[in-house]
Amino acid sequence: MEGVGKDVTLLKMGDQVFGSTGMAFGTYAAYKSLPENGVLALKPQNITHQEAAVIPFGGLTALHFLKKAHIKSGQKVLIYGASGAVGTAAIQLAKYFGAHVTGVWSTANLELVKALGADHVIDYTQEDFTQNGITYDVIFDTVDKSLFSPGLKLLNERGILILGAAGLSKMLQGLWVSLTSTRKVITGVISEKAEDLIFLKELIEAGKLKPVIDRTYILAHMAEAHKYVEKGHKKGNVAITIN
Ligand SMILES: NC(=O)c1ccc[n+]([C@@H]2O[C@H](COP(=O)([O-])OP(=O)(O)OC[C@H]3O[C@@H](n4cnc5c(N)ncnc54)[C@H](OP(=O)(O)O)[C@@H]3O)[C@@H](O)[C@H]2O)c1
């Protein structure tokens, strides 16, 4: 914290914080003014600022959807797009909630996803997981890669399909499925909450959640960072450093 307003009581000058500035039009900046009741928390003590900076995007998204699905211990969960920002957080959180987790990713990310604790791994370039006859209680498609129809067929009778990156037409299809069958489809835009951020901080400090950083760029190289991210194959997150 480089400056604190006169009415702020929860934080003080010099506190090391992390958080989300939410979605907004604007530009990148070294400083940002935020309300103290925003999505802000003290930084986990056991990780760097860069590591803390990448937690809110994937961590809050994964936590929001897994909580909406009421994930329970012992459930069979499939995470699709498991090596992205949302996927790497979703694997670790689903394991924390006691699920049996299968992660789907490409050969290049096999070791990464195993290291995050997935019980079972499927390489989508080698195996068509929609044809192996295994069904799941929860399927979380983090990247919107056409998992709608095949995903529904892989669900148990009261299973839940989470489409974390669905557009409007899939949101409407999902609503129809939820209204007309025993299966449910969860879509929508997440609401970021400070209490969820504090929960993630505590998991990190307990060693249950680890940030995954693929590459780091300096602020002046933001265009290169965007080009890399937009290829759609980053491993976890990309961080920006500010001197
Ligand atoms: N609903 C909301 O409010 C909300 C909030 C935040 C984010 N989101 C959305 O969440 C999405 C995920 O973000 P992210 O940063 O986690 O994504 P990302 O890091 O860009 O995702 C990359 C992942 O997608 C995998 N992938 C790429 N092509 C694939 C394919 N054909 N089949 C299977 N996997 C494939 C990659 O694995 P390989 O490299 O192994 O292919 C990698 O694991 C974004 O679309 C974002 O907009 C939604």
Image (tube, helix red, strand yellow):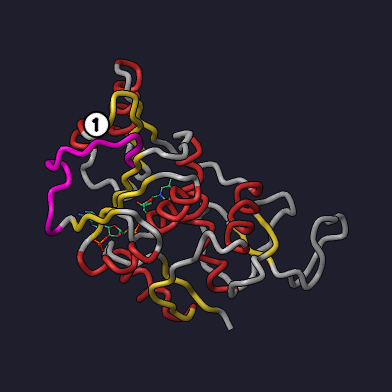
Task: Ligand 1: give its quadrant.
Answer: bottom left
Residue nearest the viewer, comparing 129 with 5: 129
Q: Residue 208: horizontal and vertical position, in percent?
A: 53, 59
Identity of the residue drawn at 12% across and 41% down: 131
Judging depth in this view, the residue of 148 and 66 nearest the camera is 66
Quadrant for residue 148, please give it: top left
Q: In the displayed structure, does residue 216 sit left or right of residue 243?
A: left
Horizontally, is 11 left or right of 243 in the view? Answer: right
Q: Quadrant of the C terminus?
A: bottom right
Q: Position of residue 35 (x, y in %)?
A: 72, 53
x then y, percent, for residue 47 = 59, 72
Q: Is mark 1 within 8 Å of ligand 1?
A: no
Relative to 233, is 142 above or below? above
- Looking at the image, is 119 positioned above or below residue 239? above
Residue carrying label 1: 152
Q: Which x, y percent locates residue 144?
A: 28, 46
Residue ranking furthest to the top:
180
Left or right: residue 92 versus residue 174 is: right
The residue at 66%/66% (across/down) is 43
Instruction: Write down the region rendered in magenta.
Output: 125-139
Residue depicted at 34% across the width and 67% down the height: 112
